[in-house]
Structure formats: structure tokens, C-alpha cells
Image (cartoon, rainbow, N blue to C red):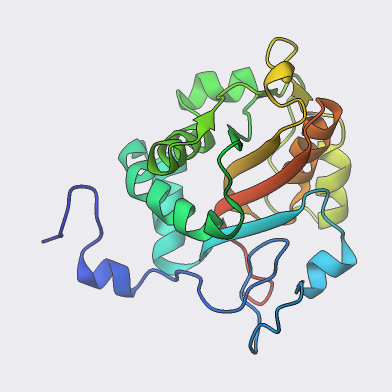
Amino acid sequence: MVESDFGLCGTCWRDTPFIGGTVCDACGVPLPGESDGFRLECDECMKTPRPWSQGRAAMIYKERARQMILALKHGDRPEIARPAGLWLARAARPFLNDGMLIAPVPLHWSRLLKRRYNQSALLAQALAQATGLAMCPDLLIRPKRTTPQDGKSAAIRFADMAGTIEPHPKRRHRMAARSVLLVDDVMTSGATLAACAEACRAGGAREIFVVTLARVAKDD
């Protein structure tokens, strides 16, 4: 039994590793200790500066969170995006603002044809519904197809993703001098989100933020 449609039961909620407390301001991964009011970053984000202002994640990519994301991404379970929109809104609350434009990480057309939907677009749509913010599903495009990133080192991921994402030529006016919030399902190295952020900068965005449903923790 659940309290509302598309919610989690008590057992699933208990087994889902939601992020709370002190986090990295760039990627949202949990950090030890208490916040001192100054910007905090994890070792990975200090080593690889991010081309966005702030980032957050709703969950750690493990256990029940991993199961839900794999079901959303590969198991034809798009309804998972509906409650996930609320979790994303809660995670992104520190930097949400009224004029912000939400945009999903794009898929190459061949991958979209095979999967039938872009899970990041579903998440972005659910986040827009939860926050009332504007959302542009095709603000960015991915004209170049890349090979799967699983198992690759961070350096190879960044090299593979460089220059693969562009502003949509008919949508770039929507991000001009505006804050953009990029949405994806999982952040591992951050290479894909970095390529998206660079594309937003090329499109004239004023400031860029990111939120992901889950963050891969280095020690997992």
C-alpha cells in the first residue's frame, strides 16, 4: 500500500538511498561533516572543474535507486518518472528560480528510435510539472552518436563526448541570457553533462545548473 499513486511503499522507501545532509555543491554527492556556509566540493569535482554553477542529485546510484533507474531506462517503466519529478524538485530546490528553463540531456536519434523515449526528457517533464517552470524538450541536440560509456575511464568519456552536443538552431533563442537547468538520470564522470553545459554556453545561456536522479559515488 502507498499513500498516493506512483509512490513508494514503506519498504521501498527505506531501501532507496536518497541523498540528504551536506553535499558537494557541484554534483550533489554526500560529503562528511557539516556545512560551514561556504561552497563545498568533492575531490572529483575539485580535480575536474564543472562548467556549470551548481549541481544536485536525488539519490545515490545503488540498491533500489539503481533498480528503478534501470527499469526507467531499459525496462519500459516510464511511470517511474512521475514520482522522480518530485524527488528532483526537492534536490534542486537550493537553486531553482522563476525564470529558469529546464532541458533534458538529448539522445541521438538512432538510440531514441530503439528505446522509443528519452528517459531524461520524461524526468525533465515531470520536474517541470512539479515546479511550474518552463521546459524545452529539444533545446539541445545530439547529432553525433557515441559508443556506450559503460566501463570507460573518465578521460575517455570526456574525450568521446567533446563536441557531440549542440544547441538546437531553432531553440537557442530560448536559452539566451537565461538560467538553464539540465536534467539527466545518472551522473558518473559528468562528461555528458559537461558537453551539454558547453552547448548551453554556446547558445548564450547566462548560468547553467544540473540535477540528476542519481549520482554514482566513487566508493561504490
Q: Position of residue 151 (x, y in %)?
A: 71, 54
Q: Nearer the viewer, residue 159 or 194?
A: 194
Q: Position of residue 149 (x, y in %)?
A: 71, 45
Furthest residue in direction left, as rendered: 1
Q: Is residue 12 left or right of residue 177?
A: left
Image quarter where the C terminus lies is bottom right
Q: Residue at x 58, y 42 (%)?
A: 183
Q: Is residue 45 left or right of residue 5?
A: right
Q: Nearer the viewer, residue 84 or 155?
A: 84
Residue 112, placed above or below residue 35: above
Q: Quadrant of residue 79?
A: top left
Q: Residue at x 68, y 61 (%)?
A: 27
Q: Position of residue 168 (x, y in %)?
A: 71, 17
**How many marks are shown on the rendered structure?**
0
Q: Is residue 179 left or right of residue 86?
A: right
Q: Quadrant of residue 75?
A: top left
Furthest residue in direction top, as rendered: 170
Image quarter where the N terminus lies is bottom left
Furthest residue in direction front, as rendered: 98
Q: Position of residue 31 (x, y in %)?
A: 66, 80
Residue 24, placed above or below residue 92: below
Q: Residue at x 35, y 73 (%)?
A: 15
Q: Residue at x 67, y 50 (%)?
A: 150
